[in-house]
Image (cartoon, rainbow, N blue to C red):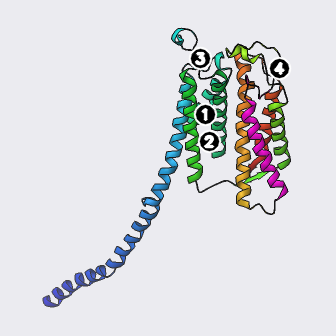
Amino acid sequence: MNDDVSTTESDQPMSDNSAAEEPEEPMAGGESEPAAEKGENGGGPGKLGSFKNLLTGGMLVRVGGAIMAIAALFSWLEVGNDSFPNVAGVGTTTFGVGLTVFVLGLSLFLRPWSVAVTLGTTLGAIGITLVFISIVGTSGGELAIGAWIGLAGSGIALIGALQVAAKSDKKPTLDVRLMPVALGAALAVVASFWLDWMLNFGLYIFSGSESSEPLNGLHPDVLFGVPILILGGIVLLACTELTAIPLITSEGRRQVLLLVCQIAGIAITVIAGSNVVGMMLLGLFVFGSGPLVALVGGLLMIRSIREA
């Protein structure tokens, strides 16, 4: 009896061990599959590389926005000996340009915007900063470091937005009402060269011009109509292609054209709005009807292009 009991007791663990040893290989195989999936989806080089690229673009946008905001605290015009006290860009010396760059830089730094909004705002900031540099001139010694810092920050943010747009796999599907977009572009184009833009503008930028006659947006003392004219012309060409040959234009190209129209509308709104809102807040009531009409045109374009 003792032998039988000992035999059965010794046989029972062996059967348990053998039963436990049988699924050992499937368990090992089961563990390797999640590990492989984790390596492919979570820790694999492909996903990490894509995420790193997106992160780099987003960081460039935020860094560029921070530089734009800081640039407005530097001198944009050299006034007096060594420009002391500091003539910051948010003051009346930049007639709204530095203030717009400051606000846009803060918005880009504090929160992420869509690709279209980021590209439009950075293009608008680059446009108004280049116009400011062109009006003041680089040879007279009146242009200070703040304008160049603002231009560099806008360029960095633009590069980051382009990188995010190129690496992003999810692009929104846009829908459009072409007639309001075309009307807004036409208003912006007409406002840039046909309507009065500023009055006695040269007096505020120390250019020596004391003429009281109205100036259009393409006048050398104004120049804010130049980027608006270019952007509005691009939108009109895109609307012409979308209207004239809708059957030939593929859906992918149609979405690209709509994105271009949306970006251009945002940039036009930024440029015209910097002339209107900036000067109203700073007390320089010298703008004419041109920037107001261009602002309405830009808002029409933005409101008429939506995600489907």
**Kind of residue at disc 4:** Pro
Q: Nearer the viewer, mark 2 or mark 4?
A: 4
User: Disc 3, disc 4: CB below 8 Å?
Assistant: no
Under tag 4, what secondary structure?
strand
Name the chief secondary structure element in magenta.
helix
Q: Which residue is mark 1?
A: 107
Magenta residues span 216-245
Of the two numbered discs 3 and 4 on the same chain, state the one appearing first in sequence: 3
What label does residue 88 carry, if any?
Answer: none
Alpha carbons under labels 2 and 3: distance apart: 35 Å
User: Disc 1, disc 2: CB below 8 Å?
Assistant: yes
What label does residue 142 carry, if any?
Answer: 3
The answer to which quarter of the image holds residue 270 is: top right
Alpha carbons under labels 1 and 2: distance apart: 9 Å
User: Disc 2, disc 3: CB below 8 Å?
Assistant: no
Position in image of residue 14 (x %, y %): 23, 83
Under tag 1, what secondary structure?
helix
The residue positioned 60% from the left and 17% from the top of the image is: 140
What label does residue 113 carry, if any?
Answer: 2
**Is residue 225 one of those drawn in magenta?**
yes
Alpha carbons under labels 1 and 3: distance apart: 29 Å
**Residue 52: in sight, yes or no?**
yes
Of the two numbered discs 1 and 2 on the same chain, state the one appearing first in sequence: 1
Q: Nearer the viewer, mark 1 or mark 3?
A: 3
Q: Residues within 10 Å of mark 1 (few under 14, many from 20)?
A: some
182 on left or right of 28: right
What label does residue 214 carry, if any?
Answer: 4
Q: Give the answer, above or below, for where 200 lies relative to 264.
A: above
Q: Nearer the viewer, mark 1 or mark 4?
A: 4
User: Disc 2, disc 4: CB below 8 Å?
Assistant: no
Of the two numbered discs 2 and 4 on the same chain, state the one appearing first in sequence: 2
